[in-house]
Image (spheres, grey):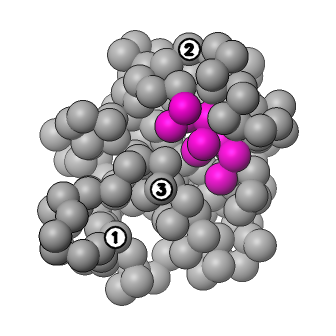
Amino acid sequence: MPELKEFIDNCDEENSIIVLLDQLEDSQNVGAIFRSALAFKLDGIILTQDNSVSENSFLTKAASSGIDKVPFTKIKNISSCIKKLKESGYWIYGLEMSAEKSLKETKFAKKVVIILGSENKGLRKITTSLCDEVIRIDINNELESLNVSNTAAIAFYEISSSTLKS
């Protein structure tokens, strides 16, 4: 598993999409996110080391080869990670149901980091404060939220379409 600097250096120079998973604990959700990342040609996945799922058979099965084909790394400190990503020219987008701006209204940069928060709590306050933009996916008001892996797939599709990654 590469260190963060090496991971960032290996990502595409002009157009790049990375997902940062902030304390996701469900193996099947993380596996499904790997699968969607592969489907929409994301450049990589960053996972937090603490309070996050470890590689296991459930994750591997749900990833359907995504874990073998999508580069990933683990980080200890989300603040320093986001700082390094910004220094490398990435624009940081957090997905949060309470955001004022929607995914559809957003004009994405060429170098994108999309942050997804934990299944139970969403994005942490510190993480939200470090985002350049916080956006939401519009859904029916009768539903509180989508599963994080569904949210990821929708966001990956929209962002990869708008940045011509597909």
Is 33 colored magenta in this rendering? yes
**Magenta: main secondary structure:** helix
Closer to the camera in the image, 33 or 77: 33
Q: State left or right for residue 126 relative to residue 64.
A: left
Q: CA distance from mark 2 to mark 3?
A: 20 Å
The residue under label 3 is: 150
Q: Indicate which label's residue lies in the foreground, 1 or 3.
A: 3
The residue under label 2 is: 54
Label 2 vs 3, first from the N-terminus: 2
Q: Secondary structure at mark 2?
A: loop
How many residues crowd around disc 3 within 10 Å: few (fewer than 14), some, or many (20 or more)?
some
Q: Is residue 66 above or below residue 86?
A: above
Closer to the camera in the image, 142 or 156: 142
Residue shown at the point (43%, 58%) measured from the top left: 151
Q: CA distance from mark 1 to mark 2?
A: 28 Å
Q: Amino acid at mark 3?
A: Asn
Do residues under tags 1 and 3 come within 8 Å of each other at their CB atoms?
no
Q: Secondary structure at mark 1?
A: loop
Segment colored magenta? 28-36
Closer to the camera in the image, 52 or 62: 62
Task: Please state, as top left, top right, bottom left or bottom right, where the C terminus lies in the image.
Answer: bottom right
Q: State left or right for residue 63 relative to residue 52.
A: right
Q: Secondary structure at mark 3?
A: helix
Do residues under tags 2 and 3 come within 8 Å of each other at their CB atoms?
no
* Residue closest to the far bottom: 105
Numbered tag placed on residue 137 in the rendering: 1
